[in-house]
């Protein structure tokens, strides 16, 4: 678009060098283009200073040994070699993170789709229930961790008091290696099923044309059949979006484990983001931590790419052929 | 229509009644399910608020009481006495206000530029914005830390809000750009013919029309900065500089030696840190819900 009115006389004149640099076809459009840069300036500066510069610096740092005293010394791929072959926490923390994400994502996706379907039944008071289901998602991570470590406390927590009152042994929840990750999966599920995923599914469900269901009913389709053959394909773009965002979010899990267990007991909830954080800001091994961060970025990008690639097999976009 | 109805055998009255009955039963069942779920979601909040109002002896009482026998409202006052909670709140509010206003102002300017101007590299800028959304923050975190360290910003709240003034993040830029694309060009053109400058067009015509998008962005940014944990954890070292999120974590970790004495205060602190998010959600629910639904469908 351009608001500059092009006069026929000036159109024939060759635009100046500056005009050609900014991509304007005429002197009059040059001012417009320059103003465009001016309005975009906060982002251009931000991109250079806070994104592009740090990306370059972080690639460089990942190839160095960095210490606070001596600064960076070139190390080539040594950090990556150490991570893959020598760091005893590297693979276990990656595996733990994948295990956590592998459980949280399906649980929260299926749970939020069920909740959204429930809310889409047009029951009275739906809005109130929607808000109520959304509340856990509003809880800041630290409050979430504090609140649940109290609820799940082995002796003093109300849940274990009830379990004991039933004559059972108290369940250790966050205090043993075996139970800590399942407990965190449960906490995350509680906080995420009624959250953004549910709202996005709900919007998706409300966008499915009623005529489709009516047509299916005339053909005698059952509710299950309608769900599988109409609802799921029609909301598949929302499923893809929630899946991609869900996996990225779950792999980045940090605050919950940091606050509730500090990665323990005995590294039982030592997730990958915790490993990066502690290498960087507890030990100040900034070179090594940068290498870990890039490996982590590669994993995230790989997951996203694979999903987007696979998605054209199962995602259906209405209106596109 | 009438002829079709006539051909079909009319359902017997008994059948119709049983159909209605099963329909009603299904509705009732759905209500039972939805209410049970509501309890599952609400109970932890209820118990947190209830614990925060109990006396020290009652928090640890077995069997636990659902409601405090005598609500101890002074727990909320004590939280401010045993921790620098007032300072934490003030720091958090400062960060949230500065960061949110920065994000709103700068991302709407950038969105305006991407939606309404023609210049070389414009589409590249948009693409870069989208690409940065995929990159995990950990990748840029360490060099940013070194940068802020060099600037002497460690242990100040500056790293938590100043970056927001430079575009306000890719998501916000994208949101503003998409919203402005839906506004008719004729508005701009009419104003331009009347001699309005581009800044004036933005301020007097487009920005007021973008209110829903701006409100959505403000609410989401408020929540994000209020809850943010990792950045303040990295940048703030001394207690008096903490935000509520790191403060709460500190408060949880410190009384580990004498934990029994603190749970009611800790829960009260939890409630204080939760309350603004809940108030914000209920007062701006419309924008919030629409914003999230919008990202899911168009994102």
Image: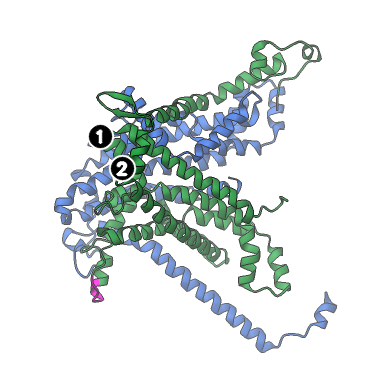
Chain colours: A green, B blue
Q: Nearer the viewer, mark 2 or mark 1?
A: 2
In the image shown, does B177 or B230 lie closer to the viewer? B230
Q: Which mark is residue B187?
A: none
Segment tinted magenta in the rendering: A164-169
Q: Are marks 2 and 1 in contact (CB under 8 Å)?
A: no
Q: Quadrant of the C terminus of chain B?
A: top right
Extreme left residue here? B258
Residue depicted at 48% across the width and 62% down the height: A111
Residue B59 placement, left or right of A276: left
The answer to whether tags 2 and 1 share a subunit is: no
- Residue B78 visible from this viewpoint: yes
In the image shown, does A215 or B129 lie closer to the viewer? B129
Residue depicted at 20% across the width and 48% down the height: B78
Q: Image height check: is B184 above or below B281?
A: above
Q: Which mark is residue B237?
A: 1
Numbered disc 1: secondary structure:
loop
Q: Image height check: is B136 above or below A33?
A: below
Counting other residues with Cα less than 10 Å from the Cα at mark 2, is it few (<14), some (14-19), or many (20 or more)? few
In the image shown, does A265 or A94 lie closer to the viewer? A94
Query: Where is residue B91 shown, x and y percent of the image?
Result: 31, 36
Query: Where is residue B19 shown, x and y percent of the image?
Result: 63, 82
Picture mark count: 2
Residue depicted at 46% across the width and 56% down the height: A105
- Residue B67 visible from this viewpoint: no
Q: Quadrant of residue A122?
A: bottom right
Q: In terms of secondary structure, what is the magenta stretch mainly?
A: loop
Distance, label 2 to label 1, CA atoms, is 32 Å
Residue A135 placement, left or right of B24: left
Q: Quadrant of the N terminus of chain B?
A: bottom right
Q: Chain of mark 2?
A: A
Query: Where is residue B121 shown, x and y percent of the image?
Result: 61, 25
Which residue is the site of mark 2? A86
């Amino acid at each position: 678009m351009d608001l500059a009115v092009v006069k026929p006389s000036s159109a024939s004149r060759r635009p100046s060098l500056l005009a050609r640099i900014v991509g304007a076809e005429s002197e009059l459009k040059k001012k417009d283009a320059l103003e465009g840069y001016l309005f975009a300036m906060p982002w251009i500066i931000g991109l250079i200073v806070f994104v592009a510069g740090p990306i370059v610096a972080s690639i460089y740092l990942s190839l160095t040994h960095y210490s606070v005293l001596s600064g960076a010394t070139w190390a080539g791929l040594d950090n990556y070699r150490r991570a893959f072959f020598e760091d005893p926490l590297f693979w276990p923390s990656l595996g733990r993170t994948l295990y956590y994400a592998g459980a949280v994502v399906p649980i929260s996706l299926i749970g939020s789709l069920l909740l959204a379907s429930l809310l889409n039944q047009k029951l009275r008071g739906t809005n109130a229930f929607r808000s109520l289901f959304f509340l856990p998602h509003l809880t800041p991570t630290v409050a979430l961790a504090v609140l649940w470590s109290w609820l799940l406390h082995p002796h003093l927590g109300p849940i274990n008091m009830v379990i004991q009152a039933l004559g059972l042994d108290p369940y250790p929840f966050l205090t043993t290696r075996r139970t800590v990750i399942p407990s965190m999966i449960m906490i995350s599920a509680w906080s995420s099923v009624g959250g953004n995923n549910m709202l996005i599914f709900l919007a998706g469900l409300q966008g499915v044309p009623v005529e489709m269901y009516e047509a299916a009913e005339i053909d005698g389709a059952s509710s299950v059949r309608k769900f599988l053959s109409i609802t799921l394909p029609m909301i598949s773009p929302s499923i893809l979006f929630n899946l991609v965002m869900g996996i990225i979010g779950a792999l980045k899990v940090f605050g919950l484990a940091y606050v509730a267990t500090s990665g323990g007991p005995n590294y039982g909830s030592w997730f990958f983001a915790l490993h990066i954080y502690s290498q960087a800001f507890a030990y100040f091994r900034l070179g090594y931590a940068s290498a870990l961060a890039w490996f982590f970025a590669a994993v995230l990008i790989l997951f996203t790419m694979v999903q987007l690639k696979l998605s054209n097999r199962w995602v259906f976009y209405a209106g596109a052929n | 229509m009438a002829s079709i109805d006539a051909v079909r055998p009319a359902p017997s009255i008994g059948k119709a009644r049983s159909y209605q009955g099963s329909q009603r039963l299904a509705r009732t069942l759905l209500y039972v399910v939805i209410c049970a779920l509501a309890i599952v979601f609400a109970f932890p909040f209820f118990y947190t608020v209830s614990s925060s109002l109990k006396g020290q002896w009652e928090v640890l009482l077995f069997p636990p009481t659902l409601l405090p026998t005598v609500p101890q409202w002074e727990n909320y006052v004590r939280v401010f006495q045993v921790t620098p909670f007032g300072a934490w709140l003030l720091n958090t509010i400062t960060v949230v206000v500065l960061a949110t206003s920065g994000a709103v102002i700068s991302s709407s300017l950038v969105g305006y530029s991407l939606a309404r101007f023609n210049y070389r590299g414009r589409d590249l800028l948009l693409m870069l914005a989208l690409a940065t959304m995929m990159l995990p923050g950990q990748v840029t975190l360490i060099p940013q830390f070194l940068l802020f360290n060099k600037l002497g910003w460690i242990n100040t709240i500056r790293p938590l809000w100043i970056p927001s003034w430079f575009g306000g993040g890719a998501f916000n830029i994208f949101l503003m750009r998409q919203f402005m694309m839906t506004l008719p060009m004729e508005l701009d053109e009419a104003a331009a013919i009347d001699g309005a400058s581009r800044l004036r067009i933005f301020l007097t015509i487009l920005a007021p029309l973008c209110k829903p998008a701006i409100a959505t962005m403000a609410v989401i940014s408020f929540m994000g900065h209020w809850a943010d944990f990792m950045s303040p954890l990295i940048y703030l070292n001394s207690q008096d500089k903490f935000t509520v999120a790191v403060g709460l974590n500190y408060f949880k970790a410190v009384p580990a030696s004498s934990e029994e004495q603190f749970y009611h205060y800790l829960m009260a602190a939890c409630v204080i840190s939760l309350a603004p998010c809940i108030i914000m959600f209920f007062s701006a629910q419309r924008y919030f819900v629409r914003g999230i639904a919008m990202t899911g469908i168009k994102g």
